[in-house]
Image (cartoon, rainbow, N blue to C red):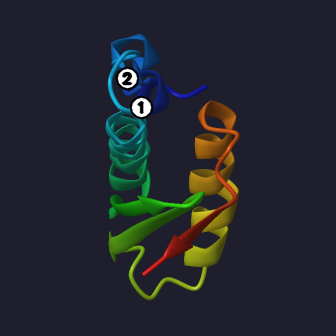
Amino acid sequence: MSDAYSGIKPDFSAMPIDAPEADRMRALIEMISAYIDYFHGGSVKMEAYDDGVLTISMAGACSGCPLSAETLHGWVEGTVKQFFPQIEKVESE
């Protein structure tokens, strides 16, 4: 693990456990976005959560990037489903 990576480990213990599900999901997306910003210059933002579908927007270097689908499904969706297994899908608006 590089020194740059070790300096931005997320503190998942800071996520409010008793907060509403949408608030906890938004906090997780913000942590993921911090990684994306640091390493790639892009960002993700939670736009909506309804009936098992999480909608995010992608900005910065992620907007128009040919690997944005990999980021969306591989990184964002994979991480979110670890914490919220009831999520059916994650999509970008």
Front-most of 72 and 34?
72
Quarter that holds the C terminus: bottom left
Q: Position of residue 83 (x, y in %)?
A: 61, 32
Query: Looking at the image, do the residues carrying marks 2 and 1 touch, with CB atoms under 8 Å apart?
Result: yes
Looking at the rendered structure, the secondary structure element under dot 2 is loop
Front-most of 65 and 53?
53
Q: Residue at x 56, y 54 (%)?
A: 76
Q: Amino acid at mark 2?
A: Gly
Distance between mark 2 and mark 1 Cα atoms: 6 Å
Tell me if residue 13 comes above or below residue 62 in the rendering: above
Q: Amino acid at mark 1?
A: Ala
To which quarter of the image does residue 40 belong?
bottom left
Q: Position of residue 8 (x, y in %)?
A: 38, 28
Q: Residue at x 37, y 16 (%)?
A: 18
Q: Position of residue 75 (x, y in %)?
A: 62, 53
Q: Residue at x 37, y 23 (%)?
A: 7
Tell me if residue 28 comes above or below residue 6 in the rendering: below
Return the residue at label 1. 4
